[in-house]
């Protein structure tokens, strides 16, 4: 084709559309030959079309399987470490004990030793299960027993504890008596007031003790939320505070209305996808809301934990196991009552409820993975019109009927509670078995040790998923981890792995999304194209002085700046009575929120505004973005001990930011125009001209032929273009989010 033409592409996830246009944007047509025996030899065809293909799949499935393999491998390693400690002493008692446990997953014909999975004889096996119907019966017995107990029983209890060791959401020591709903709710109220910055804060002096009691009552979840809301008469039943209360009691919270979202956004702490859904919501509303959601989740965990630790007997050293034993006994007693009731009142439903595993009755609940929620719905429909069913329906509404020992809410149990039971068992038996006293520290480390996320997988060699730095090639165990792994170098490598590269300057790393430099750029890049219609009806762009005043008076003092605030500012400062704002809808997308966060943490405005401290705060924000672990954050922030007092450092350790920007510091405030010596940020802040301010944004600045930014960027992008393209160059391109650069 000799004519000029343009090819337009519409590239989607499962298709590519194309069209060929002439300079007037009309579709190009051409006569095409038609093969075959027909009379028509040519046909005029439009040069456009579409190619369909199967959408690409993410690596989520592979990642989930890889994560599960690692989790199971680490669990097996914990059991192996425990067996190594018990090996010599166990051989004196029962030399085949561990072999039988290893064979317990095999069919009888393939077992290497006795057919019974735990003990050598059928009599011992029966006696064990009669005395200890569940492992929690055994754990409670050992934690409270003062007499010497069979070493095999001690191992079984400790193995169960280190195998299912609880979560690590709470750092340091935990006093079970003080794992308080009261304190966590008070922290939530403070975070709520700070985050939403309402005209009238939620009263922190409200009777928190009464709230704690209401949240732990055996009522329906909705009723608990309503009862707590009554203590806050200024809050509406459909307001944002009520949505958090719903989540705290275990129901769904809806956030579409408050945040004015286009689609419904419902969150529930107990759902597996909660973290992903929260990340999606924060991407829309801003990371400044992350802390209040985290504190609400802490209250939820405390409420659920209080529902598990129902035994208040101070004589037992195993409150978790005692509570689960009580749950077992209640289940047994209620099941007997329920069976008798169904036989008497609904005999024709007995088989369906207790034998048919395909239904959502008791058989399906126990044998066929029917969830507790579905089982309760089934019971409500079954019993709602049956006389005498009030006892069962009341327990169903309270979610306290025929509960299993292992349920979804066990995920809220902190590892410290399991650790206390482990310590109690060893404390009772170490007098009879001295090796337990000698190895108590190691056994506790098996339970408490976890590989820090910033160290990553411990694979040797050139695994593309590993970045840890080793001091030597010895096998890693919980008690030599710090000697083998260089945590400092591993953390540095983790930072490098986390941060993407600037698409304009491929050798430069992007800034954190909440970097004050990046937020300042975002504010001025948006503000520079905002205009207003003055009292004479003329459109005016802000001068550099006006922009700086708006930045100081509005963005430094308000987390969100809307058109009303800007109009009020123009009226008060420039006597413009009827300013009509152009270039922004209801409010600015950009925010200088990190500045306000640091002010609230106690950092003085003078220190924040001092240009000499810019690099310091950029490093602080990078640490708070990269790391989640408070121990590592505290270690990384220790270099700033001389700049901040301990109170501010402690508050910084608890702060965490998420997300990364798209641009580097070098692009925003590094490269300079050859003639004016100004950076891009300088131009965004000061781009005055006469008779009309230019006020160019980023794209206009880097494409302006009168400036040298485009030339400098092209030079950076052309470095080593003559060399072959390697996978590592492609790897620097940010392709994690398909919708990032639309």
Image (cartoon, rainbow, N blue to C red):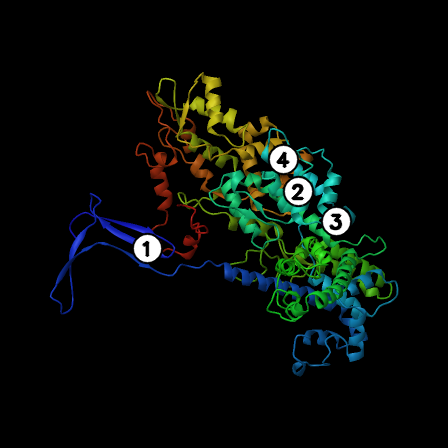
Q: How many marks?
A: 4
First in sequence, mark 1 or 3: give its number. 1
Furthest toward the top, the residue is 575
Say which of marks 1 and 2 sits in front: 2
- Kindly indicate the quadrant of the structure image that contains residue 390: bottom right
- Quick check: can you spot residue 46? yes
Which of the two residues, 471 or 108, is positioned nearer the viewer here? Answer: 108
- For disc 4, the marked residue is 235
Frontmost residue, 303 versus 666: 303
Q: Residues within 10 Å of mark 2 (few under 14, many from 20)?
A: some
Task: Give the SS element for disc 1.
Answer: strand
The residue tagged 3 is: 174
Q: Disc 1 vs disc 4: Cβ atoms closer than 8 Å?
A: no
**Contact (Cβ within 8 Å) of mark 1 with mark 2:** no
**Label 3: few (<14), some or many (≥20) within 10 Å?**
some
Occupied quadrant, residue 31: bottom left
- Which numbered circle lies on residue 16? 1
Q: CA distance from mark 1 to mark 4?
A: 51 Å
Residue occupied by mark 2: 226
């Amino acid at each position: 084709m000799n004519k000029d033409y343009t090819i337009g592409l519409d590239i989607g996830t499962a298709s590519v559309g194309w069209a060929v246009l002439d300079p007037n944007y009309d579709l190009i047509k051409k006569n095409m030959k038609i093969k075959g025996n027909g009379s028509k030899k040519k046909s005029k065809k439009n040069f456009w079309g579409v190619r369909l293909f199967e959408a690409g799949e993410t690596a989520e499935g592979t990642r989930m399987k890889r994560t599960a393999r690692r989790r199971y491998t680490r669990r097996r390693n914990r059991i192996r470490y425990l067996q190594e400690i018990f090996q010599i002493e166990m051989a004196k008692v029962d030399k085949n004990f561990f072999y039988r446990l290893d064979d317990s997953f095999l069919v009888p014909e393939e077992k290497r030793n006795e057919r019974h999975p735990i003990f050598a004889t059928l009599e011992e096996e029966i006696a064990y299960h009669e005395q200890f119907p569940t492992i929690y019966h055994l754990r409670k017995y050992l934690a409270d027993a003062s007499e010497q107990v069979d070493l095999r029983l001690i191992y079984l209890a400790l193995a169960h504890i280190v195998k299912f060791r609880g979560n690590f959401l709470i750092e340091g020591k935990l006093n079970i008596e003080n794992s308080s709903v009261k304190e966590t709710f008070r922290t939530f109220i403070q975070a709520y007031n700070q985050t939403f910055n309402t005209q009238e804060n939620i009263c922190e002096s409200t009777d928190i003790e009464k709230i704690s009691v209401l949240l732990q009552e055996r009522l329906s979840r909705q009723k608990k939320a309503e009862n707590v809301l009554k203590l806050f008469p200024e809050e509406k039943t459909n307001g944002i505070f009520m949505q958090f209360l719903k989540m705290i009691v275990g129901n769904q919270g809806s956030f579409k209305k408050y945040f004015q979202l286009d689609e419904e956004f419902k969150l529930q702490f107990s759902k597996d996808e909660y973290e992903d859904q929260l990340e999606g919501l924060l991407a829309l509303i801003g990371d400044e809301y992350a802390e209040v959601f985290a504190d609400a989740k802490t209250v939820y965990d405390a409420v659920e934990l209080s529902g598990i630790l129902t035994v208040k007997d101070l004589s037992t050293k195993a409150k978790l196991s005692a509570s689960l034993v009580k749950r077992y006994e209640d289940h047994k007693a209620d099941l007997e009552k329920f069976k008798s009731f169904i036989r008497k009142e609904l005999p024709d439903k007995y088989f369906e409820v207790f034998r048919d595993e395909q239904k959502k009755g008791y058989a399906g609940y126990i044998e066929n993975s029917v969830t507790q929620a579905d089982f309760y719905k089934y019971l409500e429909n079954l019993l709602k019109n049956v006389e005498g069913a009030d006892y069962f329906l009341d327990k169903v509404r309270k979610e306290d009927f025929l509960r299993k020992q292992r349920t979804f809410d066990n995920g809220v149990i902190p590892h410290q509670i399991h650790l206390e039971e482990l310590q109690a068992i060893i404390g009772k038996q170490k007098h009879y078995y001295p090796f337990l006293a000698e190895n108590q520290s190691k056994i506790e480390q098996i339970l408490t040790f976890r590989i820090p996320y910033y160290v990553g997988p411990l694979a040797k060699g050139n695994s593309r998923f590993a970045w840890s730095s080793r001091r030597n090639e010895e096998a890693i165990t919980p008690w030599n981890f710090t000697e083998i792994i260089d945590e400092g170098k591993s953390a540095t490598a983790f930072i490098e792995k986390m941060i993407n590269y600037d698409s304009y300057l491929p050798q430069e790393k992007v800034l954190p999304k909440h970097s004050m430099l990046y937020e300042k750029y975002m504010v001025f890049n948006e503000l520079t194209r905002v205009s207003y219609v003055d009292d004479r009806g003329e459109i005016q762009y802000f001068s550099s002085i006006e922009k700086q005043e708006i930045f100081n008076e509005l963005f430094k003092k308000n987390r969100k700046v809307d058109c009303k605030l800007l109009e009020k500012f123009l009226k008060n400062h420039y006597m413009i009575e009827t300013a009509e704002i152009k270039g922004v809808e209801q409010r600015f997308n950009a925010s200088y929120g990190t500045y306000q966060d640091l002010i609230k943490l106690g950092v003085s405005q003078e220190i924040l505004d001092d240009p000499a401290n810019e690099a310091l705060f950029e490093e602080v924000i990078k640490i708070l973005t990269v790391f989640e672990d408070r121990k590592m954050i505290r270690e990384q922030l220790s270099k700033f001990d001389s700049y901040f007092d301990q109170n501010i450092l402690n508050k910084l350790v608890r702060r965490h930011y998420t997300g990364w920007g798209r641009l580097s510091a070098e692009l925003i405030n590094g490269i300079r125009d050859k003639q004016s010596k100004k950076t891009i940020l300088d131009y965004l802040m000061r781009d005055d001209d006469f008779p009309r301010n230019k006020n160019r944004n980023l794209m206009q600045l880097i494409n302006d032929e009168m400036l040298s930014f485009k030339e400098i960027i092209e030079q950076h992008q052309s470095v080593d273009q003559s060399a072959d393209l390697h996978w590592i160059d492609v790897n620097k391109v940010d392709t994690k989010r398909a919708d990032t650069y639309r």
